[in-house]
Image (cartoon, rainbow, N blue to C red):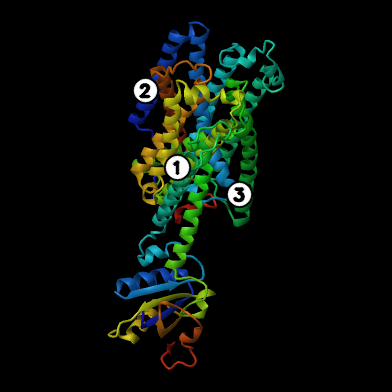
Amino acid sequence: MGVKRFAVGCFDNEDVLFPAVKKVRKAGYKIHDVYTPMPIHGLDAAMGLRDTSLHTAGFIYGISGTTTALTCISWVFTIDWPLNIGGKPHFALPAWIPITFELTVLFSAVGMVLTFCYLCQLAPFVKKHHFHPRATDDLFVMVVELTPKSNESEVIGFLQNAGAIETKIEEAETGWWLGRYDKDKRPFESPNVISVQ
Amino acid sequence: MSSLKEQFVMSPRYRMWSLGLMGVGILSVIIGFIMYGTGDEEAKARFWATMLQNSVYFLLVVNAAMFFICATTLAMGGWQMSFRRVSEAISVAVIPIGVIAFVILMALVLGNQHHLYHWLNTEGDKVLEGKKGFLNRGFFIVWTTLTIGLWIILGMKMRSLSRSLDNNPLPNVEAGRRYVFTNTVWASIYIVWFALTVASTIPWLWLMSINAHWYSTMYSWYTFASTFVAGLALITLFVVYLKNKGHLEVVNEEHLHDLGKFMFAFSIFWTYLWFSQFMLIWYANIPEETVYYQPRVRGEYRGIFWLNLIINFVAPILILMRRSSKRNYTTITFMAVVLLFGHWIDFYQMVFAGPFSEHVQLNLFDFGVAAGFVGLILFTTGNALSKHPMYANNHPFFKETIIHYT
């Protein structure tokens, strides 16, 4: 992953955040992400994110659940160990539908949860960098990715003009890692964090 | 708000089509009566079965529009406000079709059509005598009258509540709260009555009693799910039609997506009930229960029976599953037409496979009568839409539908 530089702008109003996102994108800056305390309708569209492919993954998991159930049960009851159950045919499809349905749901549910965790890089003991502690409380935090050639004060000024109430430049490793928060630079110790108010 | 096209005007073409379809229906009824109605017992029953199937199906479908309004009112829904007047207009058709269905049901019971309703003459039949407390003429007549009457009256009340705001906007928040509360009260009365009729007794009386010896506890829910899917399909079709005509500016693909989700979800719900009813009877394999499925699965009706499952389950699950297809006007229109037809077929096998198990007699007479009812719905809905503004725009939740986002 490597450490990158980011410009962080904090907004306290949804009505300011949406035009700001549009302005920043229009100016050609790359938005790393927008961290919000709650889901905001329409923000994904405003940020230009593509639709998630989690649905497709879920469909594939579901289909594999259906296939697993049907092949397994039909093999067991017609080839491996045919039993006469209540005089029903060995290939008793209606009786298998509930199990097939359950396995479809199980596969797609578990598969989608694991895929979701992987896509969000969530797992036990995994640490991620926080750009602003109040992103989980009452601020909408927009993070703009900088390149070595970026003019930092220009980006900060742009964010402030767009309505950010608090801005700063931060260096962070954006990936995820196992272990403690030692890798996370502490704001009051790090000389790299310039707070521009 | 002044820029919205608030008034629907029935175009000559629309009027011509609806009157034409109604003419086809009336002609079919006359020809059908000459062909079957004057014949022997079975031919007469054939005529009345067609009338019963079509009138009950279309009555329950238009009634589902009012159920949709009341259910969303109780759920404090705001997204449906943009096309609320459309479902209100569809529910106006409960009045004419309710009267027609009432006449047909009375003719069946009073005219002693025991080839269809063989519980009319018990003749020492132990099973039917045991069911006499429920299946008898008196109760049938009283309950049918009450059912259709209260659907009409409660529907009128809900519509007049919605229209009462058109010329006098709510003065303050307090009045808005009171208005929402009044709506909730009337909607809950409707829902309770709906539960006592469509979700329980009415399908038993009108349809399940065709197979009076047989019973299924799933039957009423199955009928409800069937007609609710078809009702949603009908609302969707009208919304798409009006959208094409340049009306309903605030309806966009978000609303269409939600209607599509409803259609998809209730198609799956219908399948769940279809399967639950089928599987338990298949598994238990008791002759008095399997008698219902004998003509359907093994007999002459097997084609229609499996076609029913393909149209109403396989088609929606494959076509409506994707997000993009629920937001596409073409696919959603296609699926709405398919589902309306599919549940008509469902009702066909529910009514006909019992008394006419020897062979399927589906012919132009059935389709003609169905066309007549379609014309009647088109005419009544268009007429009701053109009388009142297209938007309930003084409703407290109206803003919610404009900013709706899924």
Helix, strand or loop at label 1? It is loop
Parent chain of label 2? B
Q: Residue A8, relative to residue A122: is it above or below? A: below
Residue B131 in the image: state x and y as whole percent.
69, 21
Q: Which residue is mark 1?
A: B390
Do callouts 3 and 1 point to residues on the same chain?
Answer: yes
Residue A93 visible to an observer of this rendering: yes
Q: Secondary structure at mark 2?
A: helix
* Residue B382 screen position, x and y as percent: 43, 33
Q: Amino acid at mark 1?
A: Met
Cα separation between marks 3 and 2: 41 Å
Which chain does the residue under circle 3 lie in? B
Q: Are marks 3 and 1 in contact (CB under 8 Å)?
A: no
Which residue type does callout 3 highlight?
Val
Is disc 3 surrounded by few (<14), some (14 to 19) or many (20+) residues within 10 Å?
A: some
Can you identify the residue that label 3 sits on?
A: B180
Up/down of A117 relative to B273, above or below: below
Question: Are dots 1 and 2 in contact, CB under 8 Å?
Answer: no
> At 65% across and 21% down in the image, what residue appears?
B140
Q: Secondary structure at mark 3?
A: helix
Identity of the residue drawn at 41% across and 55% down: A55
Outermost residue toward the front?
A: A80
The amino acid at mark 2 is Gly
Specify whether disc 3 shares its chain with disc 2: yes
* Badge 1 or badge 2: first in the primary sequence: 2
Q: Do callouts 1 and 2 point to residues on the same chain?
A: yes
Above-or-below relation of B110 to B100: above
Judging from the image, mark 1 belongs to the subunit labelled: B
What is the C-alpha distance between the residues marked 3 and 1?
20 Å
Q: Nearer the viewer, residue B269 or A122?
A: A122
Which mark is on residue B20? 2
